[in-house]
Image (spheres, rainbow, N blue to C red):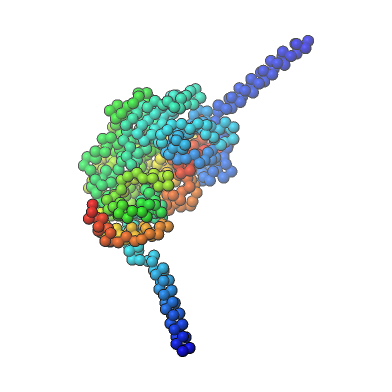
Amino acid sequence: MKKIICAAILMIGFILNSTAQTTKKTVAKAPVSPSIVNGKLVYTKYCMVCHQIDGGGVMGLNPPLSKTEYVLGDQKRLINIVLKGFNTEIEIDGDTYANPMPGLGHLTDQQVADVLSFVRNSFGNKASVITPAQVKVVRASK
Amino acid sequence: MRKNTIIPIFIACLLFIGTLFSFMNKYANEITPFKADADNAGLKLPDGFGANKIADNLGRARHIITTKDGSIYIKLMRLVNGKGILFLQDNDKDGKYETQLAFGDYLGTGITIKKGYLYASSDKEIFRYKLDDAEKVIDPLKPEKIITGLIAGKQHQTKSIVLDNDDNVYVNIGSPSNSCQEMDRGLESKGRAGCPILDSAGGIWQFKADKLNQTYVDGVKYATGLRNVMGLDWNTQNNTLYVMQHGRDNLSSSWPKLYTDKQSAELPAEVMYMLKKGDNAGWPYTYYDPFLNKKILAPEYGGDGKKEGSKEFIDPIVAFPAHMAPNGLLFYTGNMFPERYKNGAFVAFHGSWNRAPEKQAGYFVVFVPFKDGKPAGKWEVFADGFSGVNEVIVPKEAQHRPCGLAQGSDGSLFVTDDVKGAVYRIGYTKK
């Protein structure tokens, strides 16, 4: 009987421990999702020159990407900004930004999803990833 | 007997008070003698020069102009308490200026004084205000609108202004485009045929200084093919207009097969032009390569980074490193600085953003020696350290960015900053 209890405790302990380890692993693994890693490459090539290395943008010209509703809010609008470009004067924290952004419709659904997942999880942002399927739907709905 | 002494004493007192008042008054009508801050306001300057931060936290301070008694007007790019022009004086002569008046309910960049009027610009209009003998605005609420209906796009929308000595005002109308592409800044997007933007922007327009409500039909397209000009000045030595162009961006992001990111960071040159009526500086068809020392055909119009641009376009007279954003130009006519500075050009470089992932450049004021209206030596950094950091990797790291330039009646140089709104005064202190 004692043995059984001991075994049971050991097993419970083992299960709990492995669960904990799994959780830990997941936490550590999240920032290196392949989509986000690839997204950084897309960002460096197509976005960084205007939005800058730190996503901070340029005063009066190119808007910052950190903690703004344009990045963290409506995902359809965000996907459309990348696909079709953006030519509207906007205000973020009292500053206006009006430099037109070209559409990047030549990027694949996967690339758009990657770069947006990267941006939504960089520069102090923490938000869900964007999937290629979402991009496909928005692209088709024009 | 007693009466006889009182009268002379009374007269003596009157004379004394009178002299005192006239002395104070005389003093009040002169610019505060220059005195540098202990740390030169954080600036690095050539030997013998000092700097004094005369005001701070004014807002987005753009162009600046001084009066003959040392007061200053500053145009703001964003309204502060609903006002876009500041008038500052240093009444207590402690070297720090205080805002005396805020007026003008429009934001903008350009401001200048000529023949008894203050001229100021919004992004679509130019106004002028009559000045009194002390160059104070007589009625801040009732400016005359002299030019209206100018194109102001979502980029390069600011209007810098300067006057010649014949009652003409010159206004830059920046192109609302990087390189006149079908899709602005787009990937491999071609240039629009005949670039229709040039009909109403991308150049310098000349208007009359004293005629109300002028529009495009009243103006003259004085020079074209200029992407965007912010720094401009009338050189009184040879009665000629000089401008600094903001060169094009995005060579590698638009044309990755033709340009590397490093090339894109270093091309094209920011250039100074001497403009004659009818000149064409070549935007968007060409840009200036400071390494090849040639005008190069833009990729939007068939260029490959090597093909030369058309000879019909004028050449620049000075080429600076790329993307440094020249926001202010001033020909120095004062007597305070050493002789070599006389008639030379100061240029305020706001600092780059289009060099990422390379580190940024500019964020300083340079000097170019001139002789008879032509550059007489290589350009040199004159005032540095505005950014407050050793290197600027991203523009928002810069604590201050130089923008406007003005010359004080004593020959000191005023520089505005449009991040926080500091105003620097640079003087020569070596005896």
| Residue A78 picture location, percent across and down | 32, 53
- The residue that appears at 34% across and 29% down in the rendered structure is B147
Q: Return the residue nearer the eye: B73 or B107.
A: B107
- The residue that appears at 59% across and 43% down in the rendered structure is B38
Q: Find the residue positioned furthest to the front.
A: A1
Q: Find the residue positioned furthest to the right.
A: B1
Q: Is residue A54 above or below residue B138?
A: below
- The residue that appears at 57% across and 36% down in the rendered structure is B95
On the rendered structure, is A138 left or right of A60? left
In this view of the protein, can residue B96 be seen by the observer?
Answer: yes
| Residue A99 picture location, percent across and down | 34, 45
Q: Return the residue nearer the eye: B194 or A119.
A: A119
Residue A11 occupies quadrant: bottom left
Quadrant in the picture for the C terminus of chain B: top right
| Residue B235 picture location, percent across and down | 40, 31
| Residue A32 picture location, percent across and down | 37, 66
Q: Find the residue positioned furthest to the left.
A: B193
Q: Is residue B410 above or below residue B191?
A: above
Q: Is residue B261 above or below residue B203?
A: below
In this view of the protein, can residue A41 be seen by the observer?
Answer: no
Q: Return the residue nearer the eye: B305 or B167.
A: B167
Q: Is residue B68 above or below residue B3?
A: below
Quadrant in the picture for the N terminus of chain B: top right
- The residue that appears at 25% across and 45% down in the rendered structure is B181
Q: Please tell me how many numbered marks the rendered image carries.
A: 0
On the rendered structure, is B389 left or right of B230? right
